[in-house]
Amino acid sequence: MTIDIITLHPELLVGPFDHSILKRAQNMGLFDYQLIQLRDYGLGVHKQVDDYQYGGGSGMVMMCEPLHQCISDLKSIKNYDEIIFLTPDGQQLTQNISNQLSLKGNILLVCGHYKGIDQRIRDLHITKEISIGDYVLSGGELAAAVLVDSIVRLIPGVLSDETSALSDSFQDDLLAPPVYTRPVDFNGQKVPDVLLSGHDAKIAEWRHQQSLERTKNLRPDLYKKWDKDFKT
């Protein structure tokens, strides 16, 4: 998989991509990325990429010309399965979206700044718009890092235990159950007996019940959706 990222601040992404799971995926040849500095396509001597918005109002808008030329150049040398704009008003990122995107070959991400990008770029080029939550960041770079991490870890072979991702929270619209490791007794708090029993079926049932209870208590919105889908 390759993920190209159009950004005004590539330095914000170098760190996250040069460590841990993302670095391992690159070393294994399963993932590669390219950071494209949008200002290289800026207009005039000062490489302008933003301007005042029509109709008045505070905040600048990323201009059409630099983004259009940048995206067009990239599209001329690579076929993208998705061109994604990271924006607070996009579709909220879910595990299901990450699952779907992990099956793609080439993805292009556009990191917004200021008040966002000119709507005409969204109409002309963007195939999907994603938000990582109902809040506003200074730019799309941190959101891009979150999205990329959520995708790449799902690529077969990236995680040393490929079944690990299948038991993550949200994979089945439930929160993950509590987990324990050594010691068995820590300050009087003991690991549940069922986890020490070696009985796979009983352990699976316990974990499922714990997931149900945790989801019902902590994320009733998810539980209602799961319960509804299960009953239908």
Image (cartoon, rainbow, N blue to C red):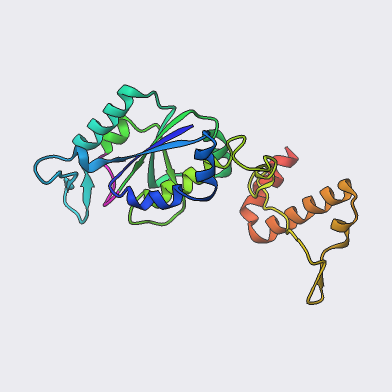
Q: Residue at x 23, y 31 (%)?
A: 69
Magenta highlight on residue 155: no
Split into 4 quadrants, where in the image is the C terminus?
top right
Residue 134 visible? The answer is yes
Q: Position of residue 109 (x, y in %)?
A: 38, 38
**Dividing the picture into quarters, in which one does residue 40 lie?**
top left
Point out the stretch of residues depicted in magenta.
113-118
Q: Which residue is drawn at 75% across and 61% down?
A: 180
Q: Residue at x 84, y 57 (%)?
A: 195
Q: Residue furthest left?
A: 45
Classify residue 88 as left or right of residue 183. Answer: left
Q: Where is residue 173 in the image (x, y as percent from the top left)?
A: 65, 46
Q: Residue at x 49, y 36 (%)?
A: 31
Classify residue 134 as left or right of residue 20. Answer: left
**Dividing the picture into quarters, in which one does residue 32 lie?**
top left
Front residue of 178/87: it is 178
Q: Is the magenta stretch mostly helix, strand or loop?
A: loop
Count the numbered circles shown. 0
Q: Is residue 127 above or below residue 10?
A: above
Front residue of 150/228: it is 150
Magenta highlight on residue 116: yes
Q: Position of residue 89 (x, y in %)?
A: 39, 47
Q: Residue furthest front?
A: 27
Front residue of 104/162: it is 162
Residue 92 visible? The answer is no
Q: Where is residue 114 in the image (x, y as percent from the top left)?
A: 26, 52
